[in-house]
């Protein structure tokens, strides 16, 4: 749920103050068979789907997939672009799991999300810019379940002092190397209960 006005102001005005603004590592976005092959190679549970409505060009997904598990399961299957699934996989392997073990002593077994693909404008406002969710290029992450059954919740643990807070803050900071836009509860009130990650053309690391 990305507010583009906020983005423009924040990235333009305080780019220098935001550690990762514009510094996403240079990933190439892949699509088509090359991308699907990569998901299969990495043992991601997904199926290809066709959700594209030719009458609505704003809501086209390049190589749409429905993902039920990256390595950790998703709390419910999510529709997204193959490129986003690939990026999420990389982020989970390289950041989420190592950080969870290092800081919380356990693996993450479930990723709790609030939604990925959604054919809508930003913050569902009439006349606003189209959201990256409309292209399946964004996902809203609400938390994680760990191997001992405990949970990490952005709504509960982002502010609460302790190891879970540290885990979430470090995770958000590192997410800026994988996603072009990262929004957190510190960004605005709309993100009080989730982190927004997208791989769209804008750049903002608001952690
Ligand atoms: Zn979002």
Image: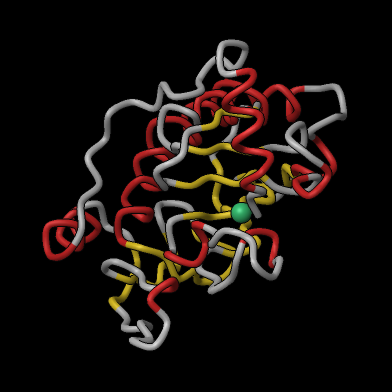
Res 145 visible: no
Q: Quadrant of ligand 1?
A: bottom right
Q: Is residue 47 left or right of residue 15?
A: left
Q: Is residue 9 left or right of residue 177?
A: right
Q: Is residue 87 left or right of residue 40?
A: right
Residue at coordinates 35% horizontally, 45% vertically from top-left? Answer: 87
- The picture places residue 46, in percent across and down from the top left corner, at 34, 70
Quadrant containing the C terminus in the rendered view: top right
Location of residue 12 by image quarter = top right
Q: Is residue 136 above or below residue 92?
A: below
Residue at coordinates 40% horizontally, 55% vertically from top-left? Answer: 70
Q: Who is closer to the viewer here, 19 or 152? A: 19
Q: Is residue 31 above or below residue 170?
A: below
Q: Is residue 156 above or below residue 140?
A: above
Residue at coordinates 63% horizontally, 59% vertically from top-left? Answer: 122
Q: Is residue 126 above or below residue 109?
A: below
């Amino acid at each position: 749920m990305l507010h583009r006005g906020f983005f423009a102001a924040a990235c333009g005005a305080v780019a220098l103050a935001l550690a990762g603004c514009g510094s996403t590592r240079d990933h190439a976005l892949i699509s088509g068979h090359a991308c699907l092959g990569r998901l299969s190679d990495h043992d991601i549970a997904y199926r290809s789907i066709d959700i594209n409505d030719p009458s609505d060009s704003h809501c086209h997904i390049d190589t749409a997939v429905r993902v039920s598990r990256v390595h950790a399961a998703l709390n419910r299957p999510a529709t997204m672009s193959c490129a986003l699934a690939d990026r999420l996989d990389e982020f989970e392997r390289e950041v989420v799991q190592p950080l969870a073990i290092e800081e919380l002593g356990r693996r993450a077994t479930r990723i709790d999300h609030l939604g990925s693909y959604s054919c809508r404008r930003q913050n569902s406002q009439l006349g606003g810019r189209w959201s990256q969710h409309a292209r399946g290029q964004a996902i809203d992450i609400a938390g994680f379940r760990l191997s001992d059954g405990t949970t990490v919740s952005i709504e509960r643990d982002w502010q609460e002092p302790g190891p879970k807070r540290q885990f979430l803050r470090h995770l958000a900071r590192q997410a800026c190397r994988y996603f072009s836009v990262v929004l957190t509860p510190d960004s605005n009130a709309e993100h009080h209960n989730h982190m927004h990650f997208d791989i769209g053309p804008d750049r903002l690391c608001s952690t």
